Amino acid sequence: MALRHYTLDFSLSTPVDSASTVHGLLSIFHEQEMTETVHDTEGHGYIATFVGKNGRLVILRVHSHGLITIDLQCYEDDNIVQLDNLLNALEKKLKTLLHGNIKRIKRLPALIRGAKVDRYWPTADGRLVEYDIDRVVYEEDSAYQNIKILHSGQFGNILVLNGDVNLAESDLSYTQAIMGSGKENYAGKDVLILGGGDGGILAETVKQKPKMVYIDQKVIDGCKMHMRKTCGNVLDNLKGDCYQILVEDCVPVLKKYVQEGRTFDYVINDLTAVPISTEPEEDSTWEFLRLILDLSIKVLRSTGKYFTQGNSVNLTEALSLYEEQLGKLSCPVDFSKEVVCVPSYLELYPFRQIWSCHYV
Amino acid sequence: MALRHYTLDFSLSTPVDSASTVHGLLSIFHEQEMTETVHDTEGHGYIATFVGKNGRLVILRVHSHGLITIDLQCYEDDNIVQLDNLLNALEKKLKTLLHGNIKRIKRLPALIRGAKVDRYWPTADGRLVEYDIDRVVYEEDSAYQNIKILHSGQFGNILVLNGDVNLAESDLSYTQAIMGSGKENYAGKDVLILGGGDGGILAETVKQKPKMVYIDQKVIDGCKMHMRKTCGNVLDNLKGDCYQILVEDCVPVLKKYVQEGRTFDYVINDLTAVPISTEPEEDSTWEFLRLILDLSIKVLRSTGKYFTQGNSVNLTEALSLYEEQLGKLSCPVDFSKEVVCVPSYLELYPFRQIWSCHYV
């Protein structure tokens, strides 16, 4: 059973005397038959806890610098209307007591803790966001990662790998961006997709001539069942008229292609943002990213293009580090960048297009 | 000074004995010189509070149904690394103590309470979301509403009216959607914009022949200074070659147009989602919406179109109620709907196109 955690905060223009403020609220807690404990804070404001029936808990703090915070925890099966009324009563009373001294009242949507279905999946830049997720559609642990497919009212099914939101059925804009935003013609071209186990890129290029390399069979298994708006039927068979899905680690595959002199018009890197490697031969994430980049550029034809996603636009340091890596490849490259809104990401993402300057 | 509120939750497969679990954690709290109070919960699990130096507060709950929740509150100027280490130590210890019994460990980004700049602006469907807002650019109270312009790292400046995110500089997709997603030709057409004080729609139609009606001068004042990526220079003057901004309540203006028999090719309703009325003659929000709709349809030419935004796609009841209103207008209408991702909304929004069936 989940715990509902409400917060109600008053930011004040000037600090208040805790005694009179608290005294004004006590009757409300007593009406609820809550047992009060006042804590010694050694001069850091006033803290009282109130324990009530059914596991209800309130923490009231009058901070010494002009802030009052109230936490209310209760179980999901408690009388929510009654608790809303308790918060309303506290808010109303504090409005009266603090009249003219209030800068901001903030009452956030309740945090739901320990629920069967977890709705909180922080953004790449570390912000707290609640999704409209109502059920877990699929969950498996592969040898490499935890794979979840969660249902959202607005985004459809969402693929979450190791806790990272990867792609939702609403996110055609992701697939379009990582394919060059409609400016490329894939007809008759050799295309190599790294990652992309959700089948989105494959589904969009399938009328043409793609070849796909992928590392994790379990992702394909989940997506072909639950992300059909994204992948259509392209994942039903590992081989189609114009595509082949290799369920392998992409590094040895890329190395083999380099050795064989096999080349492509497009390499689309849709690997997870945090790299997954079966036999890591690199010291760090950045070295792994550079290894993939280097091998990819080597299998690109002289007029070829390499597409990949960045990370949240707010991770400016990581974005600069990535561009630094581009200067360290075994052949010179140039690149362009486009910022795109992917619905389920709740943050803007940059997509990069990279090409070799070798032959220029 | 803001309060940082951390949460660390363990969801368990089977309930645990609180005595042994708590005992294993006590040394960590004692190392931090925290004073413990154990509360009587009348059989509803274990609750202990720990008060430490600098106003630090921990609430430890071992719930009787297989959930452990930890809250840690501290001030923003506290030693954050030390507190991260405290949480790490608690997490590590609990992992050992609960080995094999853990379904999920959830440690959310800290909630920042009472900060100078508020980053939490819930979505229309009531979800808790944290924006990357770093400063307040503009704040005024007009006679009708509270107007804020907040700066976000990724979305640019965001217009927030009465706590509702209205439009950010990143949100050209909003303006494009409410103008018919590029399928309309406004050249030489008579256009009436209701609301739209951010100037986005006006800026996009300015080469053509728009006329704008708006109620709240103060919104225009803030936007022409701080939303220039959205409005360009169209708000600098109330009158341009092909547009006129009426700083008036749109209801009497619409009534006058109906009386005069003045008609338009397009009416674009960009009023706030929650209506603001200077002299409300209607009983409810829905009646106000219907009044605007009715008057708008009356000033539309037979081939004219009415565009408007909906609300979050998750507010399904409100969306059906809106469509119900469409059946109650003084003349029959038909409509189409398109769902659009507006970057700063963090939720999908429907946009509606409505036309009169009068002449069909």
Image (tube, coloured by chain):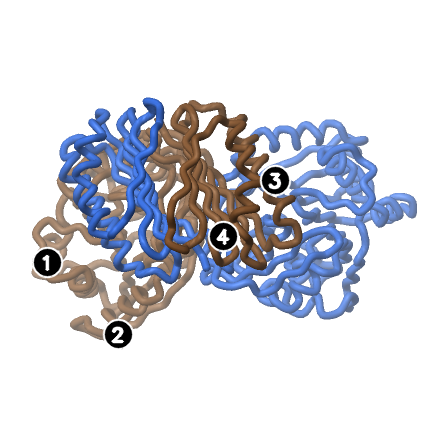
Chain colours: A brown, B blue
Q: Residue at x 41, y 31 (%)?
A: A51
1 or 3: tag closer to the N-terminus: 3
Pointer 4 with pointer 3, Cβ within 8 A: no
**Residue at 23% from the left image edge and 69% from the top image edge:** A325
Nearer the camera: disc 1 or disc 3:
3
Q: Are marks 2 and 1 in contact (CB under 8 Å)?
A: no
Which residue type carries mark 4? Pro
- Counting from the top left corner in percent of width and height, residue A75 is at 40, 27
Residue at 72%, 27% in the rendered image = B327
Q: Closer to the observer: label 4 or label 2?
A: 4
Give the farthest residue toward the bottom.
A360
Report if residue A297 is visible in the image: yes
Q: Which mark is residue A357?
A: 2
* Label disc, if present, on residue B343 of the rendered structure: 4
Circle number at residue A255: 1
In the picture provided, is A320 more to the left or to the right than A61?
left
- Whole-angstrom CA distance, mark 1 to mark 3, is 70 Å
Which residue type carries mark 2?
Cys
